[in-house]
């Protein structure tokens, strides 16, 4: 059977801390992500970092721990993330307009590498994921999202 792309769905965003000091402003978040492995093989993946962008500028990152997922299964991951408030301040006009309309668009990109065991052989794979998410700026609810993933399987 031809391998299928895994699916990713952002369930929620939770603000865990907001720190202001003389040199910077940081916001720590937890991103809750639902991941589905539709394939008939288990997968093992290495740790990686998801880049988060606002208005085209790098805003922060979320950390994905190494792990595994059984075949044809769903899993919920909690990803710790840190956003740079100073970078957000560079987009103050757009940010305050987004807060006023209670909608903020964020983009995220991640590349996950790992192995999938088929019979006696382990095959390397890479999944490239791009997400476009619209978030309620008051309650941090996910209003809308578009997720695209591309699976690349290395047979040699």
Image (spheres, helix red, strand yellow):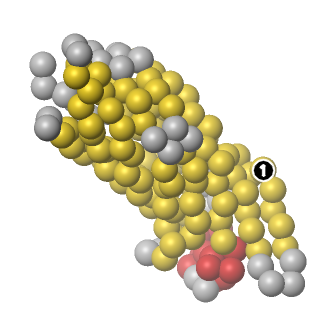
Looking at the rendered structure, the secondary structure element under dot 1 is: strand
- The residue nearer to you, when weighing 27 against 104, is 27
- Outermost right residue: 21
Quadrant for the C terminus, please: top left
The reply to whether residue 93 is visible in this rendering is no
Residue 76: name its quadrant.
Answer: top right
- Above or below residue 45? Residue 56 is below
Mark 1 neighbour density, 10 Å: few (under 14) some (14–19) many (20 or more): few
Residue 74: name its quadrant.
Answer: top left
Report the residue marked by disc 1.
16
- The residue nearer to you, when weighing 80 against 87, is 80
Task: Find residue 84 and report its horizontal and vertical position in percent.
Answer: 66, 71
- Above or below residue 53? Residue 68 is above
Residue positioned 83% across, 67% down in the render: 19
Q: Is residue 69 left or right of residue 12?
A: left
Residue 61: name its quadrant.
Answer: bottom right
- Above or below residue 20? Residue 16 is above
Quadrant for the N terminus, please: top left
Residue positioned 80% across, 84% down in the render: 23
- Above or below residue 105? Residue 86 is below
- The residue nearer to you, when weighing 47 against 35, is 47
Residue positioned 22% across, 13% down in the render: 119
Task: Find residue 124 and report its horizontal and vertical position in percent.
Answer: 27, 37
Residue positioned 86% across, 84% down in the render: 22
The reply to whether residue 27 is visible in this rendering is yes
């Amino acid at each position: 059977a031809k391998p299928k792309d895994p699916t990713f769905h952002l369930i929620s965003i939770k603000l865990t801390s907001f720190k202001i000091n003389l040199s910077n402003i940081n916001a720590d978040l937890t991103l809750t992500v639902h991941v589905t492995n539709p394939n008939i093989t288990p997968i093992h993946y290495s740790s990686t970092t998801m880049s988060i962008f606002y208005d085209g500028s790098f805003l922060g990152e979320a950390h994905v721990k190494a792990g595994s997922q059984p075949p044809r299964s769903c899993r919920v991951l909690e990803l710790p993330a840190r956003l740079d408030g100073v970078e957000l301040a560079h987009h103050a006009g757009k940010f305050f307009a987004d807060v006023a309309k209670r909608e903020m668009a964020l983009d995220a990109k991640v590349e996950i590498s790992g192995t999938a065991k088929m019979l006696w052989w382990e095959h390397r794979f890479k999944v490239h994921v791009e997400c476009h998410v619209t978030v309620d700026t008051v309650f941090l609810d996910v209003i809308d999202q578009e997720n695209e993933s591309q699976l690349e399987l290395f047979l040699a």
